[in-house]
Each structure stands twice: as structure tokens, then as C-alpha cells.
Image: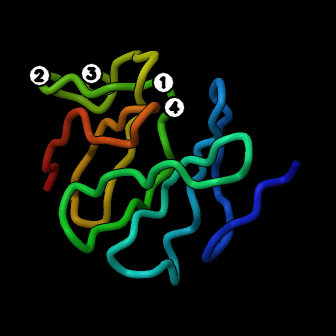
Amino acid sequence: MKPEAIHTEIVDRKILDEIEIIQENSDSYPKGKSNIYAKNNEGDIIWYAELPITGDIYLNSIQWDKGINKNGKTWNDVLTLSNNSFVVSSWNCYIVSIDYKYGKIISKEFTK
């Protein structure tokens, strides 16, 4: 079954166990709503990825199976391997690690 976008177009997706995580294009996506969400096998949305601040949106590609090393000095040092999260950057200059199961932010760093 091919997933359908809610508001724009699907730019990335990953199936994990019983859920499918979807990232929609941030262009023209409704303000204040996360453009990353998860659906269950029935196609119901089970979570929207938590945003680092109100009104933010996720612009960049998802880095699957990654976490954040707050002590990293370079981009390669900041990303670590993780079986339970992905990393993505936001419009308002946050890099966040988000839990696969619940869509909650595990870690966030302001990068500007």
C-alpha cells in the first residue's frame, strides 16, 4: 500500500515494526504542525513528531537510526548510531533526536 500525504508530498519514509514514519515536504505545510508523523498498519496517525519550539518545522532530511552526541565538535561527531531514534534539523536552527516509538524529542541542540 502506497502511503498518501496529508498536506503536501512525502519526501521520506521508513517502516519500522508496526509503524511507518513519514516526512512531508515543509513547503506550504500548515504552520505550527509537525511535518513528520507516524501511521500504524491501519493507516491511522499515531503521533506527530514533537517540535523543538512552537511554530517550527522540519526542513532537512531525516538521519535514520541516529542520535545526538552533545559533546561532538564536528557534524560527524555529533551524530551517533541509535536503534531507537532519528535526527532531523528544524527551520529555527535546532537539531533534534526523536524517539521512533512515541515521536518525542529525546535531545535537542540549538545550532545557530
If you read the primary sequence from the N terminus, does the residue marked by circle 3 or circle 2 appear first? 2
Q: Is residue 57 left or right of residue 18?
A: left
Inter-mark Cα distance, 1 to 2: 19 Å
Front position in the image: 57 or 111 = 57
Location of residue 44 (image quadrant): bottom right
Picture residue at 48% right of the left edge, 24% below the top: 65
SS label for mark 4: loop
If you read the primary sequence from the N terminus, does the residue marked by circle 2 or circle 4 appear first? 4
On the image, numbered disc 3 is attached to which residue? 77
Kindly identify which numbered label has been placed on residue 65.
Answer: 1
Q: Amino acid at mark 1?
A: Asp
Q: Amino acid at mark 3?
A: Asp
Kindly identify which numbered label has been placed on residue 75.
Answer: none
Inter-mark Cα distance, 3 to 1: 15 Å
Measured along the vertical axis of the image, is residue 30 above or below residue 54?
Answer: below
SS label for mark 1: loop
Which label lies toward us, 2 or 4?
4
On the image, numbered disc 4 is attached to which residue? 64
Picture residue at 20% right of the left edge, 35% below the top: 107
Q: Tell me residue 111's x, y (percent).
A: 16, 49
Q: Are marks 2 and 4 in contact (CB under 8 Å)?
A: no
Inter-mark Cα distance, 2 to 4: 20 Å
Picture residue at 39% right of the left edge, 45% below the top: 88
Picture residue at 36% right of the left edge, 66% below the top: 57
